[in-house]
Image (spheres, grey):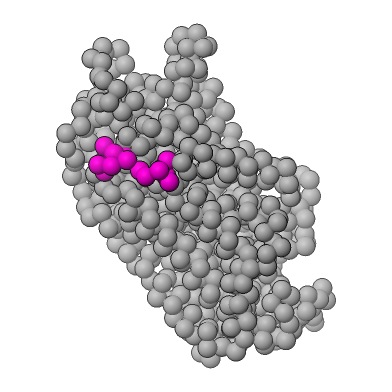
Amino acid sequence: MPVKLSTEFGSGRTAMGTQGADMDEAPNRPTWSRQIEFTLAGIGCAVGLGNVWRFPYLCYRSGGGAFLVPYLLMLFVLGIPLLYMELAVGQYTRRGPVHALASVCPLLKGVGIASVAISFIMCIYYNVVITWALYYLFSSFQSPLPWQNCNNTWNTPNCTTHAINGSNFSSTASQEFFNYRMLEQTDGVHEAGTLRWQLFLILILAWILIYLCIFKGVKSTGKVVYFTALFPYVILIALLINNVQLPGATKGITYFIVPVWEKLLSVDVWVNAAAQIFNSIGIGFGSLLAMSSYNSFNNNILKDTLTISIINSLTSILAGFVIFSAFGYMSYLQGIEIDDLAVDGPGLVYIVYPQAFANMPVAQLWAVLFFFMLLCLGLDSEFAMVEVMVTSLMDEFHRDLMKIFRRKEFFVLAICGVACLLGIPCVMQVGIYVFQLMDHYTAIVSIMFLAFFEVIAICWSYGVTRLSANVKEMNGSRPNIFFRVCWLIVAPVLITVILVFSIVQFKPARYEEYVFPPWAQGVGWCIALASIIWIPLGAIHTLWLLPGTLLQKLKLSITPFALNGKSKMPYYERGGPDGQPGIAVISSNTELPEKPLSQTKL
């Protein structure tokens, strides 16, 4: 999600097209006009709805403070080192995820394609959460709030505004608004129901907002990201100040920060902590890697890494205090334990929190602020996911796409239109089940496979020695021993262990008490394979392209930049819409003088 780029270019790198990392920065290659813009855009990309929804929900399900222990551990041994790795690769190769992975490890170039695929799948259902936020935002201008009482046409005789104590025979007003008014959900994934026209129109509105923010590329996104990245903090702090003054808030905060140590014996807690780090920071999705490719060559990568990752985690913890103080308030009002509050998945921010608003002074104001914050958090993360798809396709098929669409703006419109149409099942009455299925198999299953193969490609195939030398060339010093050990041993081993345990102890997707039938689980695995399948396909394609015997092909396939003679130049290095290259590309047939190992960094 590049923001306001200029065409500055760095100094003194040998112009060799086949050695991707050793070429001059192209005169037409955009870079950030101010480096703070990359940091801010990176924060906007990393900080999203997951910080307010998924993180507090996983804390709640994993015993409150017990989740913070593996979460913080995974942040320091996985999140920060792997973000450092991705930013270094993006900044050095000056490529998006597809070309960057093809450069560092041709055999696993499919990991880059898979990261683009997973970003596109996520942007389809992620925008549905933005649609729900818009629906609640519009509904928040009513007085009283429509989920404030049980006197509405959609309410059932079992509706209550008081304690439900986990009963199956009663439901709160906010639950019924979410289930029966907004979703009009069916009894299961086997009942498709009808299209929810209100939600569909709001989904179109959400995609129009996304399009208007990115259709001009960096020019339009740059005007938006400053507000969408910073304004949520104003609202979060205001909500926290309000919530800590409510009765029962202390009990909720205590639940959040005091661990239930027995929960740490559950593998699920550790797998969820790792998955949350990958999802929240964006490891494996390609967004931050693509954005870092627009950095100036000597940008301080470590500073950006620490800023983005730490602010992202502090935002999650801040949101945890906001949400759990509201949990304590609800527990006080209803006279039940926090464990007995009905919370599952997106219901955290669309059921429990609206229920808390209903009992606050000036309920409409807090509701409008909260759902507007959700909109802002969702938008800048959605920008990044759509931009990965757009940029990757433009890099690979620029000439063909320009023949068809003539202008990049029309191509972006086509991407948004296709994603909107694919999101229709999520705004039908069966939508919540489709959403939960897509989220489970994309955000938990697929991302662990992608992270595993990305680490193998960069840390083991490309090598920690090469990566460290690249960082030294850019920043003047090698990464310290902590990062090198994490890259070489800790991250690969941890991810392998987590991946194995997540496969062995795999649990089918569910929504509340509803467990998806086997055929639906099969559909879920198809969704997961839509991204994972590119890894073996990419390997087969690489071996087919490379010359020589099978053994020679295998050796070449793990040789960095072995495919660069055959690969196309990225869109911006071809000189943009004119299609004129900004630098000369040396043919793979051209004989190049040998360079010493220290000079090539290979």
Q: Residue furthest bottom?
A: 361
Q: Determine the residue positioned at 71% across, 63% down.
A: 262
Q: Is residue 465 left or right of residue 197?
A: left
Residue 482, how many percent across, how many down?
43, 46
Q: Is residue 146 visible?
A: no
In this view, the residue in front, 415 or 168, is: 168
Does residue 351 sit above or below 23 in this rendering?
below
- The image quarter containing residue 93 is top left
Q: Position of residue 451 (x, y in %)?
A: 53, 42
Which one is in front, 278 or 260? 260
Whether residue 308 is visible to the viewer of this picture, yes or no, is yes
Q: Residue at x 41, y 63 (%)?
A: 311
Which residue is located at x 63 percent, y 64 percent?
A: 66
Residue 418 in the image: state x and y as whole percent: 50, 47
From the image, which quarter does the C terminus lie in?
top left
Q: Number of callouts in the render? A: 0
Q: Quadrant of residue 27?
A: top left
Residue 493 coordinates in the image, percent (x, y) = 57, 40
Instruction: Give the residue at the far top of this rendering.
Output: 549
Q: Which residues are magenta?
A: 471-484
Q: In the image, is residue 299 above or below residue 257?
A: above
Which residue is at 53% across, 35% downward?
A: 453
Asked whether 472 falls inside the magenta stretch, the response is yes
Q: Is residue 262 magenta?
A: no
Q: In the displayed image of the protein, which residue is found farthest to the front?
A: 481
Image position of 124 with respect to 334: above or below: above
User: Which picture quadrant has residue 147?
Assistant: bottom right
